[in-house]
Amino acid sequence: MSMQSPLGRVRGLGSAKNGTHHWWHQRLTALALIPLTLWFAISIVAMTGASHSAMLDWMNSPIVAGLMVLLLAAGFYHLKLGMQVVIEDYVHVEWQKITALIIVQFGCWALGLASIMAVVWVWTGG
């Protein structure tokens, strides 16, 4: 039994089946961000008053650098997914919607890549 109207079946309309994928990615990144954000916040509070060299020593740990890269990657991907939903729901002029989606996509990739490169640079002692 199909919930689709006969006209919808003829036109090939109906679920594009890509909303679930997007929804799952948003939930998984949110779930990953919970422990990563807690780790980051606790670490920064613990480093309060530390010197610049102490912060660099902390960042030179491969575990810290790896967790920081995961935090940044998950954070920027989650940001991109959330902004995409907001734009698709609330921007109704098609060219504005496409322009905004392109800007968000490019911005998240550029800022995410720059942030991750900065972490790697500090980790390698660059």
Image (cartoon, rainbow, N blue to C red):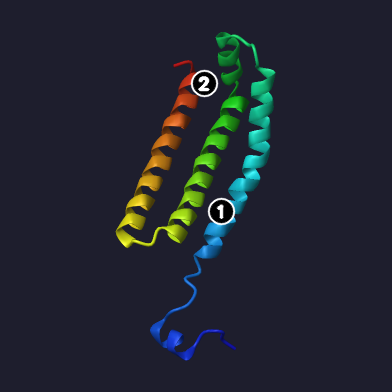
In-image side of 119 versus 31 (left or right): left
Q: Which one is in front, 108 or 91?
A: 91
The answer to which quarter of the image holds residue 74 is top right
The residue labelled by disc 1 is 25
Name the image quarter holding the C terminus: top left
The residue labelled by disc 2 is 123
In-image side of 63 versus 84 (left or right): right
Q: Earlier in the sequence, mark 1 or mark 2?
A: 1
- For label 1, count other residues whose C-alpha is less than 10 Å away and answer few (under 14), some (14-19) or many (20+): some
In-image side of 91 versus 38 (left or right): left
Q: Which one is in front, 24 or 42?
A: 42
The amino acid type found where label 2 is placed reads Trp
Q: Is residue 84 above or below residue 18?
A: above
The answer to which quarter of the image holds residue 45 is top right
Q: Position of residue 67 (x, y in %)?
A: 60, 32
**Element at badge 2?**
helix
